[in-house]
Every structure is written in structure tokens, then in C-alpha cells.
Amino acid sequence: MHNTLRLAALDRAARRAGLAPGLTLADARARVPDLAVLDHDPAADAAFLEEVADDCDRWTPLVALDTPDGVPDGLMLDITGCAHLFGGEAALRARLLAHLQHHGLEALAVIAGTPDAARALARSGKGGVVPPGGEAQAVAGLPVARLGIGTEIVTGLSRAGLKTIGDLAARPGTPLAARFGMELLTRLARTLGREDVRLVPRRPLPECIAERRFAEPIARTADIEATLALLVDDLALMLEARGAGGRVFEAGFFRTDGAVRRLRIETARPLRDGAALARLWRERIEALADPLDPGFGFDLVRLGVLRAEPLTPAQVSLDGRAVEEEEVAALIDRLSVRLGRERVLRFLQRDTHDPDRASALVPAGGAPAPSPAPTLPEVPARPLTLFDPPQPVEALAEVPDGPPLRFRWRRVVHEVARAEGPERLAPEWWRQPAAPTRDYYRVENREGRRFWLFRAGLYGREAAGLTGQPRWFLHGLFP
């Protein structure tokens, strides 16, 4: 039984022939001998639906996958505040269906006040626009299964004579909740339009958006760059009105065949300078390994700010440091756009006493601005560069827990003239595996060379290494 081949999806001609999803292939061929079938590929279906969802971003940025049974097989679009841009809800629906049909897709679209009402009507084969407040009347004749409830609840309601949503809406809610649970009443209220629930979009919503639509698609790189420059100016005005600057920008290029190309840039500091942003986008396009491939052209170009931060006008300091910082940030932005943000790094100080973890390399564009460097003593307490891993040495100390008198490193014996320490660093107990305690010494040999040594482990209390005795290591060299 489990190996039986069944129909998963049908076209309109197969449905007219009396076939239905779930029917075994043997029964289907008995009814339609010349039936043409293909293997079902759920992964390919999901990928194709994602591409259609990307294309539907041209109508509204609030696009979500509809997964009533855990499998995405539809789209939900929140067109609140967008319908007037296309001449109203009916005109938007007509343009959407015409656009999909132009690309060989047959779709059924319903516009209603709540997602649940639209889903119930669409999955019942009814399209159109439900007038405001007319959801209850529109869904009254639908079967209760369209509420998206379990089969056991549907069976129980049918046995009680409640077969349609209208029958269920006419009954008091308290007995229904006591018998079938509050989930039934929640879905009923949402389907009747009495309770709304917001969609969770599949892509993050931009802080602000600017776009250009073209009656004649554009394909030349010069036209694309000129369009981005215009959109950058529009975004700069929006950001200035909010007192903010963008940190993450995304450009979307919508092709006439439904494909969508996206590019993203991140800046090292909040930015709303139109000339600087236009230059970054130009370099981003020039640095592409593969061209944008406009195909037959782009009929919509959209530019959005995915992340914005407060940006106040900066006062130029007398020493010129503000100008220098701006120039460094601009250089980081240009290098990150051209080479990739993972290749332009800066050191970030960590709040830890462990020398191995005191700094980390992070993308320079996404790292916080470095704090002013502290005033260093004449003799630094730690070297600027360390060996990774620390290099083992043979050391001789006057007392077990004292500083070394001499040590051998790379077959050379160094006589210690001066030593300072120890700086005892205990391991961080929340990290596994725990390292032995380290005693660090700053030492200087008779030739004046300075070293940073440590002893791993404590005599009689902590074992280190295979021998169980503390061991000496060279961790860094002082300049």
C-alpha cells in the first residue's frame, strides 16, 4: 500500500476527466489510458514557488508562503497601503493574474480582509474581491474543512450537523470551545473577518524603499547605474527626514520574465550621502564576477534600506580627526564592496584576560567603531604580536614557582638578566576543556632582548603535559 503510486497534482484537463489528487496511478490509467505523468519533485516545486514569490515582491514587500499542511503550495500577499498604486484592489488583482498568465502560470486570487478568509475562498475555487466587512457572508457556504482544522474535528462537527462555516457561526461559541477547543473559535473568527492576524514576510522589511518602474525595460549598465543614482537621492531625502543613515542597502532588479536579481552593500558607518552611495553601487556592479544578466530587460528597479541607524550632522574638529575618520570609513566601504566584506577585516578587542582570545578579526564594515587607544606605558605589559600556538621552551628557575634564570629556545640558551612577574591568569571556568593556570613573566636576556614567557600549571596543585609537571612556553616577543 505504501509503495502505491498516486497522483499528487493535476492540470485542468485531468480534472475535467474526473481525476483527483490522491487517486492511484492504476485507477487513473484505467479511466484515462493515454494519461501523461511525471515524477513528483517537491523540492523543485518549493524552489519554483520561491521564484514566484520573489517576482511577487513587485506588488508588495509583504509576501509569505502559504503552508496550511506544512507544505508550501500558495502565496499570501499583504497589499495594505499598496492597492492605490495600481488603481485599486480589483485592478491590482487583474494585473497580477495577467502578469502570471503572461509567464505561463494559471492562478486563482482572492482579496479579503483577513488571510484566513482569502485562503478559505481561494482553496474552494472562488476568486474575486470581497468587499470590506463581507467576509462572513462570502465564506458562509464553505465546508468547515476550509477552516484548516483537523479531520477529527471536522468529523465531529459533521456528526453534530454543522457542515458549513455558516452553520458553525450561528452556534454559540462556549459549547463549541468546550467540545472542540479554543483553536476552532480562533480560526472561525479569523475566517469570518472578526479577528485579523499579520503575515510573517519571508524577507525582512526595509526601513524605507524607493523604486522606478519602466514602460520600456532597461538593459544597459549605464541606464541601471543612472537609475540607482536617482533612487539613492530619493533614499537620502527619506533618511535625512528621519535623522538616520543606512548601514545595509539592497537593490532588487525585476526582469520582464519574472526573474529577480538582488545586490547588497554594507557600510562601515551610517551613510546617506548620495554621491558616496552612487559610487559604491557603481563599484559593486563593476566587481561582479557574473553580470546582472538583464535578459529582455528590467521593468522595475527597487532600492531599500534594510538597516538604518541614527545619524546626526558631524562637526569637523580643529585637529582634522573627524575628516580622517570619514576618509578611513569611506575607504573601508569601497574595499568591502570591491573585495567582499569577509576580506576586509579589523581587530576587535574582547572583554577577556585570556591573551589567546583578547582580540578577534571581524569584518571592518560591520564592526563597531574602535574606541580611542589607551595611553600605553613606556614598557608595554604584553607584546603586540603573539605566537600561535605558544612555542615550548626549556627553562630553569631558582625556585619552583619563581621566574626563569635561563631558558633554551630554538637551540639557543638565553641567560635572564631581569625578570618581572608573575601575572597569574586563571582559566575561564565556563570554557571546556579547562586550561591550566598560567604564570606570565616579562624577561630580558643579557643581550637586551625581551620575551614574554609563561609557566603552565602549578607545582603540587596542577598537572600539565604528559609528564604531569608544569611546562614553560614562549608566547611573544617585545619590540
Image: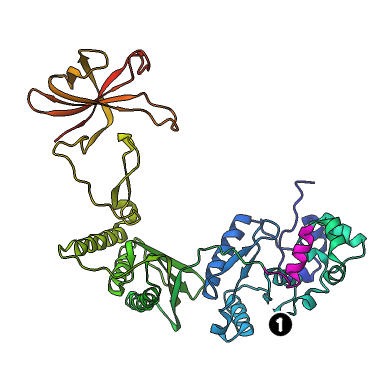
Residue interval drawn in magenta: 182-196
Viewer-side residue, 401 vs 395: 401
Amino acid type, residue under disc 1 in the picture: Pro
Identify the residue at horizontal 31%, vertical 39% (top origin): 358
Image location (x, y in percent) of residue 6: 75, 55
Q: Quadrant of the C terminus?
A: top left
Instruction: Give the residue at x 54% y 65%.
Output: 51
Q: Main secondary structure of the magenta part?
A: helix
What's the coloring here?
rainbow
> What residue do we see at 78% from left, 71% from top?
16
**Residue holding disc 1:** 131
Q: Report whether 462 appears left or right of 335.
A: right
State the residue lying farthest toward the left: 447
Task: Say whether residue 367 is left or right of residue 210.
Answer: left
Q: Quadrant of the rendered structure where residue 89 is?
A: bottom right
Q: Residue 122, percent across and down?
A: 72, 72
Residue 188 counted in the magenta span: yes
